[in-house]
Amino acid sequence: MIRTARVIVIICALLSAGRADAADCLAATDTTQTNMVQFNADTLAAFNIDSLAPLLNPRKMKAASRKNHQFIPSPKRALWLALVLPGAGQIYNRKYWKLPIIYGGFIGCTYALLWNQQMYDDYSQAYIDIMDDDPATASYNNMLPMGYDISGREEQFKKIFKHKRDYYRKYRDMSIFAFFGVYLISVVDAYVDAQLSTFDISKDLSLSVEPAAIEVTNNMGNRKSHAVGVQCSLNF
């Protein structure tokens, strides 16, 4: 391009103004060429060649593309999804492996709740029947081994049935609290997981612990001593 421009300028100068004007045109052309070369050099110097590294290296290009398209969840959206539907926050965060843990906790708490509720109902009815002294209401016999006779020991079994009733009521209530505990844990986990999705966990993070000699100066500042200690350094 530069040579073509120079030839055109020379031809125009020869046709229009003679040799003197042609020399001036040549000088102007050389100045223009020098300026263009200087411009190109400055442009290349200002251009960061490192930005071409991903284009020259397929692996770096793939890593850069993956980084640009990395999914970053919204903590607020993850929180609301987890509040509306347990496990939805984990699905939104793409942590599918947590779903069996969460729903396994719900299933376990539900089973414990139903079991303790059933036992509580049975022992409550048995306690009511043994307290009314009515021979027609003897459901407590279903709680005893077949053919077991408690005649003469009614007071003892009244205490046993009362204790069993209170025992299963306590664990029924604990099952309810555990159920809501699993729900709250799933909500907190979804929010914290989304919040820490951009946290740097690269290999550059390291903690080193090593022995070190520590110089100790007394309060007067005129006496120094050395002690052995442990030095911790965190690289990030």
Image (tube, rainbow, N blue to C red):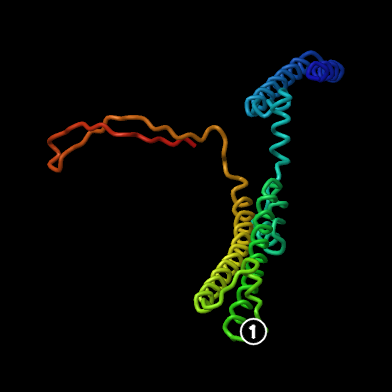
Q: Quadrant of residue 118?
A: bottom right
Where is residue 218? Give x, y as percent. Answer: 15, 40
Is 139 in front, or is 221?
A: 139
Q: Give me the residue at 38% from left, 36% from top.
A: 232
Q: Secondary structure at mark 1?
A: loop
The answer to whether 87 is drawn above or below residue 130 in the figure is above
Furthest residue in direction top, as rendered: 19
Is 189 in front, or is 100?
A: 100
Examine the rendering and report whether any part of residue 77 can be seen. no
Q: Give me the residue at 78% from left, 16% from top.
A: 22
Is 199 in front, or is 48?
A: 199
The answer to whether 84 is drawn above or below residue 89 in the figure is below
Numbered circles on residues, count: 1
180 left or right of 209? right
| Amino acid at dot 1 | Pro
Where is residue 35? Give x, y as percent. Answer: 68, 24
The residue under label 1 is: 135
Where is residue 188? Give x, y as percent. Answer: 60, 57
Q: Give me the residue at 29% from left, 34% from top.
A: 229
